[in-house]
Image: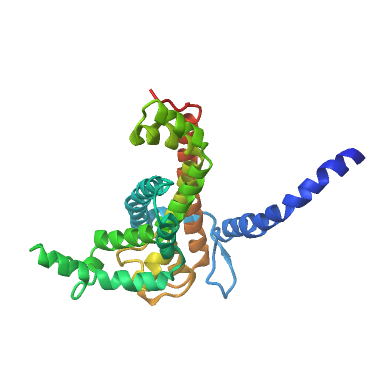
Amino acid sequence: MRRWNRTTVPYYLAIAPFFVLFAVFGIVPLVVAGYMSLHKWDGLGPMRFVGFDQFTRLVDDPQFWRALLTTIEIFAISQLPLAIAALGVAFLLSNRRLRFRGLYQSIYFLPQVTSIVVIAIVFHSLFGSNFGMVNRILEWLHLPSVDWMASTWGVNTVIALMIIWRGFGYLVLLFLAGMAAIPPELYEAAEIDGARASRQLWSITLPMLRPTIVFAMLTGIVSGLQVFTEPQVLIGGDGSGAPGVTLMLLQYDYIGRNPAIGAQPDLGYASAIGWAVFIVVALASATSWAVSRRNSDKEPELT
């Protein structure tokens, strides 16, 4: 026992802060949200136990299903193009003979450190119905202009472009870091065997980059299905009936009194929405993890 304490306890103490913070800011709020979802509470008066009525209300609420569909649409049209574009640019920047590589990396990463409010203002101006640059370009091409902020697909497209613009640089640097860990001897051997750049990408880079791709995929699912800041800043407090309302924005409406939704605050219902988001994210993450693990034992081939 003394030997176990002397050799093992220091390691547990070293990793203990992470688990303590995870329990305080992850497990405890999840349990509290589960408890609150069984009650009806406006945040000030006494709680009233309602059992699973909040979840029944959730299933019968068309606003919830509309917000869920909006969240999935934004996720679908933002995360996949974002990952593909970032991976392609990272592969081009991984060329050691490319000049000004550091400058390109800094330029790509610049939107990541830019204020999301500034980005929302710029995109709102670009896609404005009257004086937006995008509609001016469409008119110059003799195409009909689009009222982007009035339609569901238009708002979803603008939000997805904001997500792509903001997260592009982060994924590029993430993929570059993963490519830097690939032994250069593999590429040298491939060049000797006559493998072209496309063959090296499919047979060396992508298989060796699988752990980084899985990490980017899981983090993209977690962040993409919990998108809040971009629609909140872009459409403001227009309420749950407005286009572009995601699950997190719908939950935000029920946390505080939003006159646009015509409802009183209900933290119990907001907690039920939060648990629905948790279930959706968990199922999507587990599915993607299972799919990636199924092909994890494949070896890269050059033939």
Q: Which residue does the image show at 23% across and 66% down from the upper left?
A: 148
Q: Residue furthest top?
A: 303
Query: Which quadrant of the view contains residue 136?
Result: bottom left
Colour scheme in use = rainbow
Q: Which residue does the image show at 39% across and 46% down from the upper left?
A: 87
Q: Is residue 147 left or right of residue 277?
A: left
The quarter in which the C terminus is drawn is top left
Report the front residue among 209 and 237: 209
**Position above or below: 78 against 151:** above
Report the front residue among 94 and 148: 94
Residue 233 seen from this side = yes
**Position above or below: 262 against 289:** below
The percent coordinates of residue 119 (x first, y second) are 37, 69
The quarter in which the N terminus is drawn is top right
The percent coordinates of residue 228 (x first, y second) are 43, 63
Q: Which residue does the image show at 41% across and 57% down from the upper left?
A: 100
Q: Which residue does the image show at 41% across and 64% down from the upper left?
A: 111
Report the front residue among 184 and 132: 184
The percent coordinates of residue 2 (x first, y second) are 92, 41
**Position above or below: 125 against 302:** below
Residue 249 seen from this side = no
